[in-house]
Structure formats: C-alpha cells, structure tokens
Image (spheres, grey):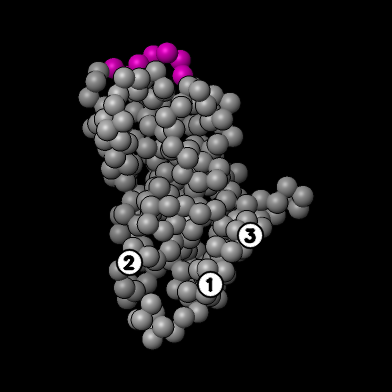
Amino acid sequence: MGSVSQLGADGRRPRGCGWEPRVHSRVVPAQRLTPMRASFSYAWPVGADMFEVLCVPEGDGVRYLSTDDVAGLSEARLDRLRRAGRRNTAAAPILSVERRNRRAGEFLLLRGEAPFIGSKILDPATMTDGHLAELDPASAPLRPDDWLLVGAPAATVLLVHRPTDVRTLVGAIDAMARECRRQRDRNAGPISTDLYLWRGGRLHRITKIDPDTDSPTVSDPEMLQTVLSRLRQTPDDEATR
C-alpha cells in the first residue's frame, strides 16, 4: 500500500514525464518527514503535525516525489502538479461509510483500499464524494464559512462530522478523539490522532494527545470557543451576520 514507513528519497525518478494523470497528494505525519525534510523541501505544511507530499503509484505501492524529482519545475508548474495530485486524491474511491455515535454527535467513518482516503482531510468538503449529506439529508449545502470536524487516523480512514449545534459538536469531539486513536493504532499507514476543524481549505488543530495523561485534550480553546459561539447564534443572528 505504500505506508509512510516507506517514505524516502532513493534517487530513482518515476518513469516518464506525464505525472499529472497519476500523481496524488498524500498527507504524512510530521514526525516521519522531519528527519528527511531536506529530501522533501517542497512539502507543504497542512496542519500542526502533517505535511502534504506528492506521490505516484508504482507497482503495488507508491513512489514519493523528492526534492530532486521536482527540481527544475517552476513554481507554477509545481502548483499545477499539486492541483492534479489533489484531484486524483479526491477521486480515490470510498468503499464503505459507517455512521457512528448517532445519539451524541454523529460522525462518518469513511474507508477505502487506496492509501489516499485519510488524505482527503485536505479538502473534506469536496473530496468525500457527497457522503456528508448522509449525516442529514435535509441539511443545507455546505457554505464557504461552515466548519467541518475531521480526523485522519490512517491512510485508508477518514472521520468527518458537520457541526450543527453545541451539544452534538462536543459529543462528536469526545467520540471522534477516541475513535481516531483507535483507528490509528489498528490500521496500516498511521497518520495522526489529532482532530482538526476545517474551513475554506485550512486546517486548525483542535485536539491533541496530552503527553502527561496520554489522553485527548483541547489544543486550541480559543478556536473551539469561536465555533461554539457561532453555533449558539439564533437564526436571526445568523441571517444578519
């Protein structure tokens, strides 16, 4: 599957020059990338503990593009390659959708065989193939200023919750933090135990594991309070915001 344990720059270039049809964006943990950061100097930080890198399928695994692989590409060309990578990651098929924690903050657990499902955390609003509607078919379409609560525990797993009120968001944070850790420990290609709030293409870490207690803790109380305050607004307040 090409787990992050295989991340490395071995000097081989992918065959051919037509990368765009095959290139994928993949999220890797910072702790795996940092020791070899020079070999992936182009990597884009996308969260407090994650980087986005490019890779191409090769045989039964994937081949990560190194700094040497993209050397000589203009900034515009590299950006074009990144957009192609995101499109291809968005197209990775989600094979199962599980509804979890229905009584106290429902979220979706999305799975697939391709090692790019967790990487859909890059843009969960567009990369989840319409599955968000399964949380509440009657809900309005996602707006640019709406938030999603997301977790990427492993390469083949993504967790998503759409906040609608304070009670369900708090319940989802608690349940998703535990599930994120469980899925990270059980699946190949571990990514992160942290939860993020996503909006408009940006990820904001909201929970992390406390090293002293080994338990999830809120990492950005101010950000969480901002979202909770918005959820407390009345419909009239929202209409005039």
Asked if residue 76 shows in the view, the reply is yes
Asked if residue 108 shows in the view, the reply is no
Q: Amino acid at mark 2?
A: Arg
Depth check: 49 or 92 in front?
49
Query: In the rendered image, which residue does mark 2 sit on?
Result: 143
Quadrant in which residue 199 is drawn: bottom left
User: Which corner quadrant holds the N terminus?
Assistant: top left
Q: Residue at x 51, y 41 (%)?
A: 50
Q: Residue at x 33, y 66 (%)?
A: 143
First reached walking from the N terminus: tag 3 or tag 1: 3
- What secondary structure characterizes most of the magenta part? loop
Query: In the rendered image, which residue does mark 1 sit on?
Result: 228
Gap in Å between the C-alphas at discs 3 and 2?
25 Å
Q: Amino acid at mark 3?
A: Val
Q: Give the residues drawn in magenta, as a range.
A: 9-15
Q: Secondary structure at mark 1?
A: helix
Query: In the rendered image, which residue does mark 3 sit on?
Result: 218
Residue 193: where, in percent of width, then height?
58, 48
